[in-house]
Amino acid sequence: MTGRNLLGFYMREKDKDAEAQTSANIPLFSLPTPSRSGLTQSQMESVAGCLSISKAKTKKRQTYTPKEKATIARYATSNRLADTVSHFKHQFPFLTESSVRRWKRDYSKIS
């Protein structure tokens, strides 16, 4: 297999639907031949079946302004983290305790 085929295999186009790329779409020419790999044809097919290039599931993200972070951190200094997240959940549905913890720590350093 040439480096060019391998590089082309792993490169993705921006608009390509990653969910459509499954092990069934992996071209067999991108894998080494059974004689080069020392594997039987059935073993090669098993390897091809195990490979999958599906889009990694990403968390929903929200950006926060410095003012929003400060407001949340200020509230967190006098309340528990879980209570803080619950309090702001309607306004910021993707707010996590780890974010609040980090902002609270940063806020306490400057205040």
Image (cartoon, helix red, strand yellow):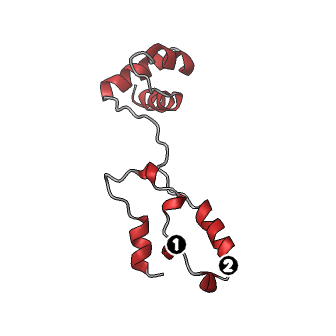
Disc number for residue 87: none
Decide which of 67, 24 is in the foreground and name it.
Answer: 24
Q: Which residue is mark 1?
A: 28
- What's the CA distance linking mark 1 and mark 2? 14 Å
Q: Which residue is mark 2?
A: 39
Query: Which residue is pictured at 37% across the width and 31% down the height?
Result: 62
When asked about the image quadrant of residue 82, the answer is top right
Q: Indicate whether 75 appears above or below 102.
A: above
Q: Indicate whether 54 appears above or below 75.
A: below
When asked about the image quadrant of residue 73, the answer is top left
Decide which of 23, 85 is in the foreground and name it.
Answer: 23
Number of residues whose C-alpha sits closer than 10 Å to that of mark 2, classed few (under 14), some (14–19) or many (20 or more) = some
Q: Tag 2: residue type? A: Leu
Judged from the image, the secondary structure of the residue bearing numbered disc 1 is: helix
Residue 26 % position (x, y): 50, 65
Query: Which residue is pictured at 31% across the width and 54% down the height?
Result: 14
Instruction: Return the disc, 1 or 2, that comes first in the chain's sequence.
Output: 1
Judged from the image, the secondary structure of the residue bearing numbered disc 2 is: loop
Query: Which residue is pictured at 46% across the width and 41% down the height?
Result: 58
Q: Indicate whether 38 appears above or below 58.
A: below
Residue 95 % position (x, y): 45, 26
User: The C terminus appears in which quarter of the rendering?
Assistant: top left
Left/right of residue 63 with respect to residue 51 in the rendered view: left
* Residue 28 seen in render: yes
Residue 84 % position (x, y): 50, 17
Query: Which residue is pictured at 31% across the width and 29% down the height?
Result: 65
Q: Indicate whether 7 appears above or below 35.
A: above
Decide which of 89, 58 is in the foreground and name it.
Answer: 58
Q: Tag 1: residue type? A: Leu
* Residue 80 seen in render: no
